[in-house]
Image (cartoon, rainbow, N blue to C red):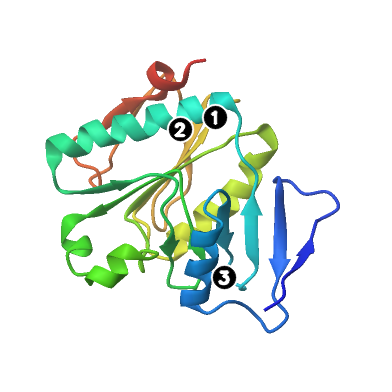
């Protein structure tokens, strides 16, 4: 199978899109493609287009690590689900495969999956996802991605914009709200007992 790389003239995100001559990979082929190119961050759109993302800079890496650690500490205390980092792929109902910066699913959902499903891209939409913008121009693209997650069954989403010090909070069938870094974010009944003030984590 031959892939043709097409670089958009003025991309908002730093990525290369691969258009497949016969449509797209099968599920197993795409998983294998990602495994043999494990040094790349690869996602698949619902249209079948394969997207290879650029690496992030040092500050974004620190911010992402702080976020993942904070969710991990909370999750160890609650023990009601699993937290996943940015290297985990989730296959949404619409066929897209995305790897949000942080994701969480309850234990009851995870335990329903087979052993093979747990080893490959997780075939469901997380109950919670968090995306961290790694550049100013990335924010608008991530807003579209957040909407797609919500349309596919996500119950709570955070889009963190460290450049404007705002977190956009997404809930099903509700208007997006903006929470400044100086205010507390809560789990909204999805992540029970979680309370985070981004100013304490990401003020760099």
Q: Secondary structure at mark 2?
A: helix
Work out how far the residue at label 2 is from the one at label 3, CA to CA, in angstroms: 25 Å
Pointer 2 or 3: first along the chain: 3
Measured from the top left, where is residue 90 in percent x and y? 41, 61
Q: Residue at point 22% right, 61% down?
A: 110
- Kindly check if marks 2 and 3 are in contact, taking CB atoms under 8 A apart as contact: no
To which residue does mark 3 refer?
46
Asked which secondary structure carries label 1, the reply is helix
Query: How many callouts does the rendering have?
Result: 3
Nearer-N-terminus badge (1/3): 3
Mark toward the viewer: 1 or 3:
1
Q: In this view of the protein, can residue 162 be seen by the observer? A: no
Category of crowding for the residue at label 2, using alpha-carbon neighbours closer than 10 angstroms: few (below 14), some (14–19), many (at least 20): many
Q: Is residue 42 left or right of residue 191?
A: right
Q: Residues within 10 Å of mark 3 (few under 14, many from 20)?
A: some
> Which residue lies under the disc numbered 1?
60
Between 109 and 190, the residue placed more toward the observer is: 109
Q: Position of residue 128 (x, y in %)?
A: 34, 50
Instruction: Return the residue at label 2.
Output: 64
Q: Position of residue 43 (x, y in %)?
A: 56, 59
How far apart marks 1 and 3 lie (CA) works out to 26 Å
Q: Residue furthest bottom?
A: 22
Name the residue located 17 percent from the left edge and 37 percent from the top edge: 76
Disc 1, disc 2: CB below 8 Å?
A: yes
Horizontally, residue 12 falls left or right of residue 195, namely right
Q: Is residue 84 above or below residue 20?
A: above
Quick one: which residue is furthest to the front in this view? 36
**130 or 190: which is nearer to us?**
130
């Amino acid at each position: 199978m031959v892939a043709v790389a097409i670089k958009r003239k003025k991309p908002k995100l730093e990525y290369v899109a691969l258009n497949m001559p016969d449509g797209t990979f099968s599920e197993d082929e795409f998983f294998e493609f990602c495994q043999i190119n494990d040094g790349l961050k690869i996602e698949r759109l619902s249209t079948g287009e394969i997207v290879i993302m650029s690496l992030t800079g040092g500050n974004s890496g620190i911010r992402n690590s702080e976020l993942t650690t904070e969710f991990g500490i909370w999750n160890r205390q609650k023990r009601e689900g699993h937290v996943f980092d940015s290297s985990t792929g989730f296959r949404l109902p619409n066929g897209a495969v995305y790897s949000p910066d942080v994701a969480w699913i309850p234990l009851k959902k995870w335990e329903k999956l087979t052993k093979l499903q747990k080893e490959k891209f997780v075939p469901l939409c997380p109950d919670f996802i968090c995306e961290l913008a790694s550049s100013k121009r990335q924010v608008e693209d991530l807003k579209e991605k957040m909407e797609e997650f919500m349309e596919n069954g996500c119950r709570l989403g955070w889009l963190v914009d460290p450049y404007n010090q705002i977190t956009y909070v997404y809930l099903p069938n509700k208007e997006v709200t903006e929470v400044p870094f100086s205010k507390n974010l809560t789990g909204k009944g999805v992540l029970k007992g979680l309370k985070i003030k981004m100013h304490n984590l990401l003020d760099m």
